[in-house]
Image (cartoon, grey):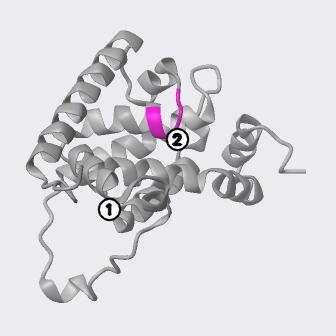
Amino acid sequence: MLDGETDEALMARTAAGDHRAFRALMDRHIRRAMRLAQATLGHAGDADEVAQEAFVRVWRRASSFDPELARFTTWLHQIVVNLCIDRKRRPRGEPLEVAGDVADGAPDALDHVMDGERQRLMQTALASLPERQRAAIALFHFEGLSGRDGASALDMSEKAFESLLIRARAALKERVRAASAGQPRENASEP
């Protein structure tokens, strides 16, 4: 009867050491954690690692979860965003041998949803934003969180989150505009 239980009930069982309840939570929310991590980091491999690490933390810190303070999804988002920020701050410098094969450049599902060129411009512009601005956009626009839940996930006031989101949108719009201006238009000679 795990499927019908709320996230908060599953967390209470997880805190008591129930592996099945934890597995149900993970199955229910791993894709959400991966989407948020990928939107924040811009790299699928890192996003997968962050999502897995987030659930390791959920298991280890289950007893510290308080449903009176936040919903489970808000708590999970906060863990994922913090892990992403930590990962971005960590220096990257691996030898070329560790890199392995070149990643497949085939478009993923997200690329099929939006126009190819616009999507590339948007991803490049999003990747150039500071971490917290990227996280705010990912939480609000990609995950559909309310301002209150986004603020909670980033551990800030709702007004501070709204201000951060406004700055992030403005910066993203300007970066997309600048990148678009630098790109030659296809079929520019056609009427």
Left or right, 159 with respect to 168, comes to: right
**Residue 100 image position (x, y, % from top left):** 26, 87
Q: Residues within 10 Å of mark 1 (few under 14, many from 20)?
A: few
Left or right, 76 with respect to 121, comes to: right
Left or right, 6 with respect to 162, comes to: right
Q: Which residues are magenta?
A: 141-145
Q: Residue at 22% across / 85% down in the picture? A: 98
Q: Residue at 46% across / 57% down in the picture? A: 110
Q: Who comes first in sequence, dot 1 or dot 2?
A: 1
Q: Residue at 27% across / 33% down in the picture? A: 133
* Depicted 160 relative to depicted 153: above or below: above
Quarter location, residue 156: top left
Label 2 is placed on what type of residue? Leu
* Depicted 69 relative to depicted 2: above or below: above
**Distance from the alpha carbon under mark 1 to that under mark 2:** 19 Å
| Residue position for label 2 | 76
Do the CB atoms of the residues marked 1 and 2 lie less than 8 Å apart?
no
Q: Magenta: predominant secondary structure element?
A: loop
The furthest residue to the left: 182
| Residue position for label 1 | 43
Q: Nearer the viewer, residue 9 or 111?
A: 111
* Depicted 11 relative to depicted 108: above or below: above
Label 1 is placed on what type of residue? His
Q: Residue at 42% across / 60% down in the picture? A: 111
